[in-house]
Image (cartoon, rainbow, N blue to C red):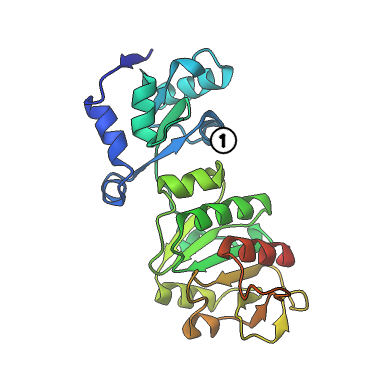
Amino acid sequence: MSRVVTSLTNPTVKAVRGLHLRKERDQSGLFVAEGLKIVTEAVELGRAPRILMYGKDAEGHPLLKRAIQATLAAKGEVIEVTQDILAKVSRRDNPQAVVAVFAQAYTSLSALDPAAAACFVALHRVRDPGNLGTIVRTADAAGCGAVILVGECCDPFSVEAVRATMGSIFAVPIVKASEAEFAGWRSDWPGSVVGTLLTAEVDHRQAVYERPALILMGNEQQGLTPDMAALCDVNVKIPMRGRADSLNLSVATGIMIYAAT
């Protein structure tokens, strides 16, 4: 049912290692997810691996058996590999015992149903994959309807971003849109569009979040641009009581998501 690979020069191993590069992910439409927990989340949501690699440490685990069955049923490839291969594929000294390759999945703006959730999140030019992955995980925890990436953003399917989602990459619809596409789509949004600005005068706790609320966040360095801020019904601030003049993007987004929900 599976084959054993021990060579680091094996073509499949080299192809999986290559998925650390965005160019390879873009060309193949594939990405790497690490860990039995994340792979199990994917399988439970109907997303079978294209390639499933596992080490001796995971052999016999009931969740791995389920993942193997799902992979084979979907005509995927199951490979038992060495610890050295797992380390090379994941680029970690202490790799997970399971590594899988999945097809990327994006949702279109037109496919989103505003009535499906109380809150949706849009991120403009987010740069840090750890922030993006954490936001996807928080959006999943809060029951958000989607995470929308506006403009040039970091790759949600990078290894770093996928790690930070802890499996939520398979649960939350991910949308890509240009600034113009987002602006046109936003004009028909039935609820409140709320942004954050350091110069805003409205406290985030006093804002009206008419559901479905659309939370719009700017990037880590600049925050919301004037054009993006102008798309909001209201811009709010999160009070700073100490010496720090701003919050990490993923923390600020989490605060806004829970304020809205």
Quarter of image, res 147: bottom right
| Residue type (three-letter) at the residue carrying disc 1 | Glu
Quarter of image, res 79: top left
Residue 3 lies left or right of residue 176; in this view the side is left
Q: Position of residue 245 (x, y in %)?
A: 62, 76
Is residue 150 something that shows in the picture? yes
Q: Residue at x 47, y 50 (%)?
A: 161
113 vs 20: above or below: below
User: In the picture, which quadrant includes the N terminus?
Assistant: top left
156 vs 177: above or below: above
Judge by depth and name the residue closer to the eye, 188 or 103: 103
Residue 202 lies left or right of residue 138; in this view the side is right
Residue 16 lies left or right of residue 74; in this view the side is left
Q: Position of residue 116 (x, y in %)?
A: 64, 57
Q: Residue at x 41, y 21 (%)?
A: 72
Q: Position of residue 155 (x, y in %)?
A: 40, 55
- Count of numbered circles in the view: 1
192 vs 92: above or below: below
Q: Which residue is mark 1?
A: 41
Judge by depth and name the residue closer to the eye, 69 or 196: 196
Judge by depth and name the residue closer to the eye, 185 or 48: 48
Residue 94 lies left or right of residue 121; in this view the side is left
Is residue 77 something that shows in the picture? no
Label 1 CA crowd tier, 10 Å (few <14, some 14–19, many 20+): some
43 vs 108: above or below: above
Q: Farthest residue in the right direction? A: 206
Does dot 1 land on a helix, a strand or a loop?
Answer: helix
Q: Position of residue 89 (x, y in %)?
A: 35, 33
Quarter of image, res 62: top right
Q: Farthest residue in the front direction? A: 243
User: In the picture, which quadrant includes the C terminus?
Assistant: bottom right
